[in-house]
Amino acid sequence: MVEGVWLWLTLFAIGSTTILTRGSFVLGGEGARLPPALQRALRYAPAAALSALIMPDLLLDAGAFDPANPKLAAGIVVALAAVRSRSPWLPFIAGMGVLLLLRKGLGW
Amino acid sequence: MNESFKRGAREGLTLMLPMSVGLLPWAIVTGVAMRSTGLSAVESLGMNLIVYAGTAQLGTLPLIAAGAPLWLIFITALVLNLRFVIFSAALAPAFHGQSWSKRLLSGYLLVDGLFVLCADRLLRSDDPHWRWGFYVAPAMLCWSMWQLGGLVGVFGASVFPKDWSLEFMTTIALMVMLVPMVKQRAMLVAALVGGLGAVLLRGLPLRLGVIAGIALGIAAGFVAERWSEKRRQAW
């Protein structure tokens, strides 16, 4: 865990990316243009980044590859809920419900 | 205050109101996620104010929890926010002639929903006062909803028992953002390669696996797009 002064420094570093990206062209003036190829490649950045953060949490257990773990089961339920329902709460309720049931109810 | 500023503000608020309410669940979940990661209430509220970007906040929490180095957290946040460069480039002409401080505020406030709802009309108006009202009023509404929901989440988090694995809410929130994106095939390729890349490369030093996975995912999405275009042309 990052703590204390380092944590605040980290928060400011993360916050600086908010200004750097959102402010980039708004602050830099409208003269500059983004190359079209770069613009197209950038569209894939959020999906690749989100997945690179999600999959290790779902597929790894204590650092080792383990496809049979309660988080993956809960993750599959979350994906189904997110595809099937338009309710913003359902994926959270269903995912946490399955995880808690498997971990606390069945002791997995 | 200028008449056309007020008119712009009123129209912007009317347009934004339904979507801004939809921000509340996100803000609450993010508030709970920050607290379950181990941030104090003050640190969590500080993050909400300083960062004000849900994806970057949720995405960096696992790295903060793991004690990852500062530069890695910075780069990950930068990648998660990169889409805003595109929004910023598209919206820039709407701030033509505005002062630097207003542009800085506009940058800080530029969230996804604001761009989706307001960009089109913003770029078609030639009245700078109307444009400023039409941007800054709904932007402040989104900001208030985010901070309000964050407060509820941050102080509501302690209601739940400690051993409820609430940190998993972060992963769920990231998944809920990802699922609508991957309905397009090239985007799905980018996500699969990015995710599996990060899992397979987890052994790299300095937790570089996450960054390497993201880079591979972006490249794979780009290649998949090119490839499907070529195939379409061949038909």
Image (spheres, coloured by chain):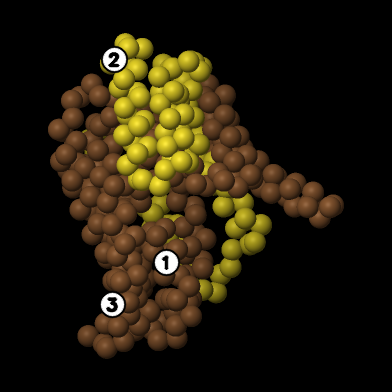
Chain colours: A yellow, B brown
Q: Of callouts 3 and 1, which one flags the residue occurring earlier in the amino acid sequence?
A: 3
Q: Residue furthest bottom?
A: B3
Quadrant of the image containing the N terminus of chain A: top left
Disc 1 crowd rating (10 Å Cα; few below 14, some 14-19, many 20+) is some
Q: Residue at x 36, y 30 (%)?
A: A95
In the rendered structure, which amino acid carries the disc numbered 1? Leu
B27 w.r.t. B202: above or below: below
From the viewer's perspective, is B193 left or right of A85?
right
User: Rounded to the nearest whole Å, what is the CA distance between mark 1 and mark 2?
Assistant: 44 Å
Tag 2 near tag 3, CB within 8 Å: no
A24 w.r.t. A93: above or below: below
Q: Residue furthest right?
A: B234
- Pick the residue in front: B155 or A73: A73
From the viewer's perspective, is B102 left or right of A50?
left
Disc 3 crowd rating (10 Å Cα; few below 14, some 14-19, many 20+) is some
From the viewer's perspective, is B120 left or right of B29?
right
Residue that label 3 marks: B10
Residue that label 1 marks: B117
Q: Residue furthest top?
A: A107
The quadrant in which residue B37 appears is top left
Residue that label 2 marks: A105
Can marks 1 and 2 be said to lie on one chain? Answer: no
